[in-house]
Amino acid sequence: MANTFRQQGDYDKALMWYQWALDGYEKFLGKSHPSSLGTVYSMAVVYKNQGYYDKALMWYQWALDGREKILRKDHPDILYTVQSMANTFQQQGNYNKALVWYQRALNGFEKTLGNDHPNTLQTIYNIALVFKNQGNYDEALVWYQRALDGFEKTLGKGHPNTFQTIYSMAVVFQTQGHHDKVLL
């Protein structure tokens, strides 16, 4: 029920159901059980969707701390939590922290999934976006190009992620006044 309410955007009901589930999981399975920690993570997602970034980060950190105690360092659940924290910092406009957390996620994804996995490439794209948002356009283009090369290789030239990356690069070229490159 909680997931359904979250998907429908009824965040108050989602939080109520998640809290109910969390209370039950913690009582019967313990606070360190993956189901308990997954529910904590889901609550963080709801808070982020509501724009309560500080609260979301607190809940993500709770999930991360618990997961790091029971899972291997490069487990996908840990990496997704790290990625979510980076995204939350990015949405706050805290770009320096976002870059630190994205780099941590990228290192883990490259190690466990490889350089051309879609999750790795999405992290690379997100890093480019942070540089773009900072106004560091040259660095953004380096990272966008890296993402583009990977998306074309892994997903193909016709994939939406490939097109989104091309579009993002065109926006940077246009912002820089390189209108000739936008038409390529």
Image (cartoon, helix red, strand yellow):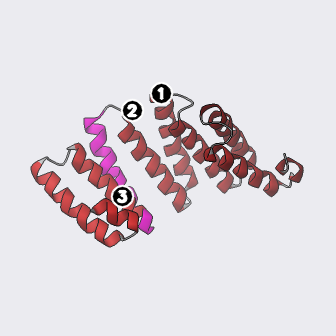
- Residue count near mark 1 (Cα–Cα under 10 Å), binned few <14, some 14–19, many ≥20: few
Mark 2 or mark 3: which comes first in sequence? 3
Instruction: Kindly report the secondary structure that dominates the magenta region of the rendered protein.
Output: helix
* Mark sitting earlier along the chain (3/1): 3
The correct choice, above or below, for 78 with respect to 115 in the image is below
User: Where does the image place residue 18, in percent across and percent down from the top left?
Assistant: 25, 61
Point out which mark residue 74 bears: 2
Q: Quadrant of the N terminus?
A: bottom left
Question: Which residues, given as a range, are shown in magenta?
Answer: 49-71
Q: CA distance from mark 1 to mark 2?
A: 8 Å
Amino acid at dot 3: Ala
Q: Residue at x 85, y 50 (%)?
A: 183
Q: Which residue is mark 3?
A: 44
Q: Earlier in the sequence, mark 1 or mark 2?
A: 2
Give SS at disc 2. Answer: loop
Q: Is residue 52 visible?
A: no
The residue at which mark 1 appears reads as 111
Circle 1 — which element? helix
Q: Is mark 1 in CB contact (under 8 Å) with mark 2?
A: yes
User: Measured from the top left, where is residue 160 in percent x and y?
Assistant: 62, 47
Judging depth in this view, the residue of 40 and 135 nearest the camera is 40
